[in-house]
C-alpha cells in the first residue's frame, strides 16, 4: 500500500486547494437590445430584455 514519504506542509496543502487559478473573467456578451455588456444567460439590468423579450418592465427616466 502506498504511503506518503513526508508530511505535506500546510502551505503546500493550502496552495493546492486554493482557487486562485479560477479567477477568470466570466462570459460577458453584448445585449441584443441595447448593446450593453452583460453576463451570459441573464436578464439585462439596463433595458430588462432577455433573448429578445421584455422580461423586466423598466421605467424610462
Image (tube, grey):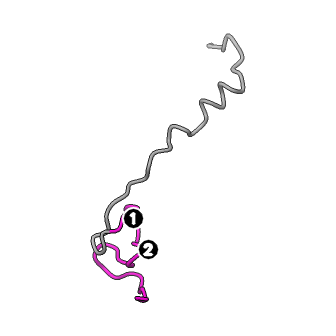
Task: From the image, give the main secondary structure of the stretch colored magenta.
Answer: loop
Q: Is 1 on the left or on the right of 43, as rendered?
A: right
Corner quadrant of residue 52: bottom left
- Residue at coordinates 55% horizontally, 38% vertically from top-left? 20
Q: Is residue 47 magenta?
A: yes
- Residue at coordinates 70% horizontally, 12% vertically from top-left? 6
Disc 1, SS: strand
Asked if labels 1 and 2 touch by Cβ distance under 8 angstroms, the answer is: yes
Residue 46 vs residue 16, the one in the foreground? 46
- The residue carrying mark 1 is 38
Q: Is residue 12 above or below residue 39?
A: above
Residue 40, image x and y in percent?
A: 37, 61
Q: Where does the magenta region start and end?
A: 36-61
Residue 24, image x and y in percent?
A: 45, 45
Disc 2, SS: loop
Q: What is the count of numbered marks?
A: 2
Q: Is 19 on the left or on the right of 53, as rendered?
A: right
Image quarter of the N terminus: top right
Residue 22, image x and y in percent?
A: 50, 42
Corner quadrant of residue 51: bottom left
Residue 11, image x and y in percent?
A: 69, 26
Kindly identify which numbered label has been placed on residue 45.
2
Q: Is residue 45 magenta?
A: yes
Corner quadrant of residue 35: bottom left
Amino acid at each position: 500500500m502506498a504511503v506518503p514519504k513526508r508530511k505535506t506542509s500546510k502551505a503546500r496543502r493550502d496552495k493546492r486547494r486554493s482557487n486562485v487559478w479560477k479567477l477568470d473573467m466570466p462570459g460577458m456578451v453584448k445585449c441584443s437590445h441595447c448593446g450593453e455588456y452583460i453576463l451570459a444567460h441573464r436578464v439585462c439590468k439596463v433595458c430588462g430584455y432577455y433573448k429578445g423579450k421584455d422580461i423586466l418592465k423598466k421605467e424610462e427616466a
